[in-house]
Amino acid sequence: MVVDSQLQKPLRPKDGTAGIERPRALAESIPEDPSPLLALASRHVVSSRQFDRETLTQLFRLSAQYESTPALMHLPLQGKILISAFYEPSTRTRLSFESAWHRLGGDIMSITDPKSTGMAKGESIQDIAEMFNNYGDVIVLRNNEDRSVYDMLDALRIPIVNAGNGIDEHPTQAMADVYTIFKWRPELLDPDLPRDKRIRVGIIGVPNRMRTVRSLLLLLARFPTAIEEVVIFTDQDSPFDEGQAEELNQAGLSVRVSKRLEPELPDLDVVYINAIAWVGDSYEQMGAELKLSTHSPLKKDSIILHPLARGEELDTDLDPTLHNWYFAQARGAVFVRMALLTCMVRRVSEVMDT
Amino acid sequence: MVVDSQLQKPLRPKDGTAGIERPRALAESIPEDPSPLLALASRHVVSSRQFDRETLTQLFRLSAQYESTPALMHLPLQGKILISAFYEPSTRTRLSFESAWHRLGGDIMSITDPKSTGMAKGESIQDIAEMFNNYGDVIVLRNNEDRSVYDMLDALRIPIVNAGNGIDEHPTQAMADVYTIFKWRPELLDPDLPRDKRIRVGIIGVPNRMRTVRSLLLLLARFPTAIEEVVIFTDQDSPFDEGQAEELNQAGLSVRVSKRLEPELPDLDVVYINAIAWVGDSYEQMGAELKLSTHSPLKKDSIILHPLARGEELDTDLDPTLHNWYFAQARGAVFVRMALLTCMVRRVSEVMDT
Amino acid sequence: MVVDSQLQKPLRPKDGTAGIERPRALAESIPEDPSPLLALASRHVVSSRQFDRETLTQLFRLSAQYESTPALMHLPLQGKILISAFYEPSTRTRLSFESAWHRLGGDIMSITDPKSTGMAKGESIQDIAEMFNNYGDVIVLRNNEDRSVYDMLDALRIPIVNAGNGIDEHPTQAMADVYTIFKWRPELLDPDLPRDKRIRVGIIGVPNRMRTVRSLLLLLARFPTAIEEVVIFTDQDSPFDEGQAEELNQAGLSVRVSKRLEPELPDLDVVYINAIAWVGDSYEQMGAELKLSTHSPLKKDSIILHPLARGEELDTDLDPTLHNWYFAQARGAVFVRMALLTCMVRRVSEVMDT
């Protein structure tokens, strides 16, 4: 059982995407402007729609500052309590939020066993919201019903973050996705980017059935000057809700659907893959056609994003390649959440020169 | 799905019962006397019987100080560890205790999955107590067996709080109930209160089968000069254990039983309702007769208390009315627990001028 | 229900094995040498094999310093996050680690519901390791599969502690066991101990099927000058894996197997008992012959160790006797883990004069 050689090896060093150089370069490329972040104080975060380009840009700047600073000088959330309410189990997203909150110095109360909660006993969502008012300073809610987070809003006196509501939205995941793209190429934030520098983004997923894809598309639409085209790869015949594609087009995002991945891969700069489509409490895998491995005809210098956890759709043989930005994406999600939570509890002035 | 107007609204403001004026008025009406609180140091809290009028009054004073102080100057429980052991699931009570402990600066270890614990594996309650001695500074225990908390006492070297033991007691809930009544009318604490100012309290519930009612009656009996009469509304034929009513009467509390709520409602100043009677692992609803809504003939200026979570017995149409003190009651419970826990870990001198 | 006399009694005082004199004597008997502890920085802790005599001795010195110091001057792990991942339920070991981490000032994220985790959903152990890299500073892992912790090592950039992997090892439990023996008799650490002062250790358990026994034997083999003989009491015909007994003998530990406990008890100075042999997800009790009570012919001044939780194999009538060192053992485990974790996160210099 003992693998002595393993135990004597030093810890695995961080790879190229995990250093502090890239977030530092991103932070330095963005002029500081605290005003959009100050406007997030005590605001709910439910939908990607709530965020404009300026707010996102400043959030990414603060995220990059956090990521490039090994240890925080002070802990802006000391004495603040997060209610981490995961009525739909999710270790990964829960730990990401909780890690963000702890790194800022705050305390946490977790709800991880849906069966033991009032919601399971038939308590109304409004009464649960009223309960949360008394016990914490911010709520993070994951629930498999689309409406729950909206039904809570009127009763809340503390801000809430939607950490995934059914098949509707997952806005902080989308922020982490877009943050990763800008860490990879900070110049994409330039509104005067030459047209031939724009990127082509492929998304393997179903916009009207995957909350991560829905939220990501809404955020990408805030940066149409960075994106030549988004191609959706799906085996579904009706991958959009009514009005969903139109909203994106009106924002200036060019979106197209394709059923064949391989012929398009050589032209994609960013490939976003997410094979789990939640359907009620269960989920289904997308078609076997839509898989990625080192045998896929990926463009040189292209990057792959995946919200994780992955299944067979993303081969581990890609892990040691430079296409692997999905690990950096997961790591960056902690810093994006740190930035957002700092703003929500009115502590921006402690970490920026406001 | 998006409800833009909701997201642009500011957070719901606190209502009249949630401000700092009422707790401040209560705190100022009570002369400070730290001695009964100092006597709580390292003491177990198992039964309402342990608390006399002076101790309760000073606890309410400290609770009101906490409630009327937006942020604590220092964190008296820093470095202290709470063992939050809920062998019977209860999100609401657990979060209330944990929020109290965190607001005082302490750390928490939670036990929320009864199936994974030693108790489920047949470990003796004494061995579990011995385990707790080594790992924490205070225990909060919820268990569906009446005897568990008593069986632990001899083995403990750290203090324990009974957060509900079967159908026996739930003393900190009762403290929160009575605290709410005194926040509503601080003059009720005056031992020389004129007889015509005394209040009439209705309790919808079963004293020998509901731990909240049993504990509440014991605490009300400490303030007989404030209470003209307590009326118990129940459809049970034997709502008292042997000696239970006599103990209350001997303390000076006038207690009467009634089966019909409506005719008595117009004469009640405080209506306490709690429709869940735990019977073993399950529970039953009281008779449909004993319900409250805006259609009930409530006395003007009367208040409603409910330990929550509520079912159909308490209509949400009462929420926006001035009868709704049950939300204030839930909020106040955090501050009552803060006060009690501060005393138990010998930190009163850090928050009072002793 | 109320037991008034119980509630008025002061908390149970610490017994003779629980004071600070014994750990202080142990600490003072060991000359300080920080170098082996500094070498533990950022190292995984998976097997007892990783620890030599010098490292263990200095760990015990630091553990004893922690145990004899009522409150820590500073909190060396402030701002550090522990990922407490118990995929096999264990309240006792989890709380012991979490208490150690909290006492050092750190924050914790717990995984206690195996069913809600990625591992249950088929996520690979390597992807889970990569997730942990992003969210915490140290991992404590309990899993019922022997291989899991080893399979994680290559992917980790933060150190991990094996808190029990199937029937393989549980090294920190073994450290607590041996620490208890040296607290009992610090002179056993003397490499020039006269032969007639050596102790005889009985172990009731199966070395190849109990992780606690496997790890304990490996650590005892680091101190052959303290031990005259180890006698294994078991009803199994093949209690050793291939090479297991040979490895111990080569290290200088004399090990013998016996099936009859009673005739040997009068000659044993330390009796280690552990009746639970995990076999997959279930477990079996050892033979009824191998039980201890006050009726057992225990040697005067001998001590009993048990990793707890206990079953019927260890009678509670031994609890008030001087043979009971199992409660001290459980208490000491917290301090041993504090010492080890302090070293792993490179904070030794904050608590020692390096």
Image (cartoon, coloured by chain):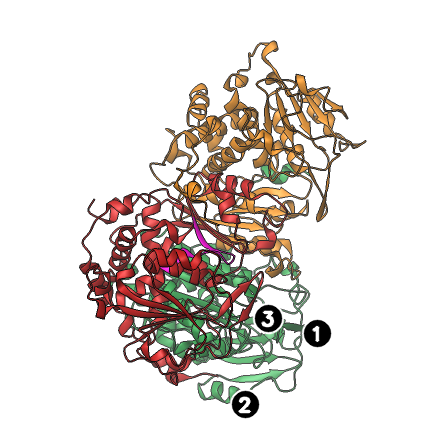
Chain colours: A red, B orange, C green
Question: Residue A134 location, x and y as percent?
Answer: 48, 39
What amino acid is labelled 1 in the image? Glu
Residues behind callouts 3 and 1 on a single chain: yes
Instruction: Work out whether residue A83 or residue C316 is closer to the camera in this orientation and state it.
Output: A83
Q: Quadrant of the C terminus of chain C?
A: bottom left
Callout 2 touching callout 3 (CB < 8 Å): no
- The residue singled out by tag 3 in the image is C273
Q: Is residue B132 found left or right of C192 in the rendered image?
A: right
Span of residues in magenta? A161-175
- The residue singled out by tag 1 in the image is C289
Examine the image and state in which quarter residue C270 appears. Answer: bottom right
Q: Is residue A343 found left or right of C313 in the rendered image?
A: left
Examine the image and state in which quarter residue C340 appears. Answer: bottom left
What amino acid is labelled 3 in the image? Ile
Residue under the image location 67 percent in, 73 percent down: C284
Which of discs 2 and 1 lies nearer the camera? The answer is 2
- The residue singled out by tag 2 in the image is C242
Callout 3 touching callout 1 (CB < 8 Å): no
Alpha carbons under labels 2 and 1: distance apart: 27 Å
Ranked by sequence position, the earlier of labels 2 and 3 is: 2
SS of the residue under disc 2:
loop
The disc at residue B23 is none
Question: Residue A156 location, x and y as percent?
Answer: 46, 40
Question: Does the stretch in magenta take in A170?
Answer: yes
Q: Chain of mark 2?
A: C
